[in-house]
Image (tube, rainbow, N blue to C red):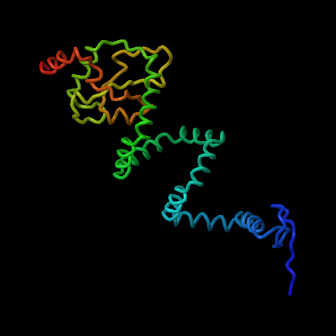
Amino acid sequence: MKKERTIICTNCKELIKHHGKGLCKQCYSKEYMKEYNQKPEVKEHSKKWREDNKEQIRERMLIYNQRPEAKELAKKRRQKPEAKECAKKYQETNKEHLKGYRKEYYQKPEVIEHMKEYYHSPNGKKSRRKGMLKRLERMDGVIHDFTFYEWQEKVLETKGICPECKENVGINKLTLDHIVPVSKAPEGFTYTIKDVTPLCKSCNSSKSNSGDHDLNTTMENFVEGKYLGEVLAMMEEK
């Protein structure tokens, strides 16, 4: 009977059955595959296979990414400085592509349904509170140099039609939007009536940092209770 040869693997340093090149079977396989995958014909074959099986790869990745160990590994990778720098660079060079992708993605029925569920979940409420606090911190240093009546006139001019999407949402559904985003405005910047515009909630929210929005700053929120009667009277006159 042939005696099995055991060695100390030069890679993992464990006493194990010899497989070749002074390596155990596992390390030998890794080393072999590393060399094999560098061959031009193998690279070409792999590229063609990935192009022909995009849907299959996508399904496998979706299943794999749901595993706890995969989520933990992805989280660690995202925390690396080089990964953050790479993500930042990609976002800067692909703004239009990402904007179009997000718009298309958030219009999917299953995504809308998921967002509704998340919105009312404990985590969703916590996330909204966190965002609201950040927004209020930024708003502390904002100066608005226009009167309520100037804003009211600007809103009434729209006749309830959103200037962005041209839909008639009604005057009470229009929100105050800063043309120069609050997050990007220079320190001490003063907003005049020319620096704000009424938009519907949907358009205001979709603008994000390209045109910051105001936590559902509807007419009812903007107007103090004592002015509400006067506002209704002005609307009837118009």
Answer left or right for 122 relative to 238: right
Quick one: 107 or 159, which is closer to the camera? 107
Which residue is situated farthest in the bottom direction here? Answer: 1
Q: Relative to the observer, which residue lies in front, 80 or 105? A: 80
The image position of residue 168, as x and y in percent, is: 21, 34
Residue 109 rendering spot, x and y as whole percentages: 34, 51
- Residue 18: quarter of image: bottom right
* Frontmost residue, 41 versus 14: 14
**Residue 121 picture quarter:** top left
Which residue sits at x=44%, y=36%? Answer: 126
Outermost residue toward the front in this view: 122
Q: Quadrant of the C terminus?
A: top left
Is 227 rendered above or below residue 98? above
| Above-or-below relation of 196 to 70 | above
Count the labels in the image: 0
Q: Residue at x 37, y 34 (%)?
A: 205
Image side of residue 201 versus residue 55, left or right: left
The image shows residue 141, relative to residue 119, as above or below, that is above
In which quadrant is the N terminus drawn? bottom right
Query: In the displayed structure, does residue 202 sit left or right of residue 83?
Result: left
Residue that appears at 55% across and 57% down? 67
Q: Position of residue 53 (x, y in %)?
A: 52, 66
